[in-house]
Amino acid sequence: MRTAAICLRNLKRRKLRTLLCVCGIALSIAFFVGVSAATLRITVIIREMNFFFEDEIVVAARDSFVIQGFPIGGTIPERIEEDLMEIADIRDVIPMLFILESKIGEVSRIFPMNITIGLPLSKLYSVFPPIFLRIEGDLPSDPYRDILVGKSIADQYGLSAGSIIHFKGENLTVVGIIRGPSILLSRSIIGSLRLVQKIERYEGQISMAVVKLKPGVDVEKTAEEIEEKINYVMALTESERNDLTYPILEELGFWNYGTKAFMLIISGILIVIVEIMNVSESRRDFATLIAIGASETSIFKMVLAETSLIGILGGLLGLLFGGIAAVFLASFYMSIPVIFFIQDLFNMVPPNLITEVLALVFFICILGSILSTIFALKVNVSENLRAEY
């Protein structure tokens, strides 16, 4: 308690410097948290995509960009289902239309940044496991009218089972709300393949075909057979999809670790500089302590307490500012009201990220304390006491 009181008195005596240091650390941590939260959310969404197609082959157009099985752009004829079923090793084929709405316009004003998915309703659970497709309400029964809506869209627009919406010129009935843990499905509108083809004007076209194989079949061999038989598609196995997505995840990881390292260095430099300046200005106090026999451990504890107060205060403010920044950025880029992200704050800034930030701050404080203590112990006791007294 005595050490903490001395440290608080020292910090109050240099209010402006302490405030600038705390603000500098807070800004560094806020940037760290904002970038990490955004990177983590993107990574989770990308990894989640692969859960839907484990051990299956995804067939898509050769010119499409595929992220863990979901093609962005490019279509193939729906009749490909018949060609695929002629291959002996294939047990079932599920045609899907996957539309990512990312353009600013009439659609994005109604359902911003939503995903429209069309597939045969009878095969809904064959693609999306029940753990992800928890339905509040009923499953679609009318293939030309009924749809499922993700919880994020439903909460944003006050939709519930039985709601009627006007979407792209069609009056549709929301028969169920998807309440599962999937981030992807929370922004999805799911209907029958025929309905989505009609409203998106892709008659006779699909984005992809999910191929389910018979037990004991060689997946790689079957994928090669598909590409030989149908030369305008690529048949992607799970390993190939992971290989396509790996560079994206690697780039995100590199950016994330680079940012963490940079913010760690900046915060450390701020703490060390301020503490060395404080030690320099308090050389009379340290000289007196050394003269009366204070141990190196006592001096280290005093410096550590001071740096910890600065670091923890800056870290907590940084977490607050970083969380707010992440929420507002997500709201701005997805055109979703801020309130819905605030409710989901601990998913955007999860406890493990908070723990990581506080651990890094503590590490910085220890490092800064060690360097400042080394500087303090180099004080010339006799000269400082002679000059001050």
Image (tube, rainbow, N blue to C red):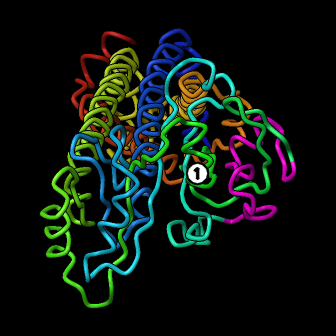
State which quadrant residue 334 falls in.
top right
Query: What's the residue type where badge 1 is placed?
Result: Arg
Quadrant of image for the N terminus = top right
Q: Position of residue 153 (x, y in %)?
A: 70, 40
Question: Relative to the observer, which residue lies in front, 69 or 279?
Answer: 69
Q: Is residue 85 above or below residue 73?
A: below
Give the residue at x 42% y 46%.
Answer: 205
Q: Position of residue 349 (x, y in %)?
A: 55, 43
Give the residue at x 24% y 85%.
Answer: 217
Q: Is residue 276 above or below residue 138?
A: above
Q: Is residue 316 left or right of residue 155?
A: left
Q: Is residue 56 left or right of residue 149?
A: left
Q: Is residue 51 left or right of residue 3?
A: left
Provide the secondary structure element on which disc 1 rests.
Answer: helix
Give the residue at x 54% y 44%.
Answer: 197
Q: Is residue 317 visible?
A: no
Q: Position of residue 71 (x, y in %)?
A: 35, 46
User: Circle 1 is placed at which residue position?
Assistant: 194
Quadrant of image for the C terminus = top left
Residue at the right extreme, as displayed = 162
Give the residue at x 33% y 17%.
Answer: 280
Magenta stretch encompasses residue 383 = no
Image: magenta residue range = 134-162
Q: Position of residue 112 (x, y in %)?
A: 61, 29
Q: Is residue 178 above or below residue 104?
A: below
State which quadrant residue 84 falls in.
bottom left
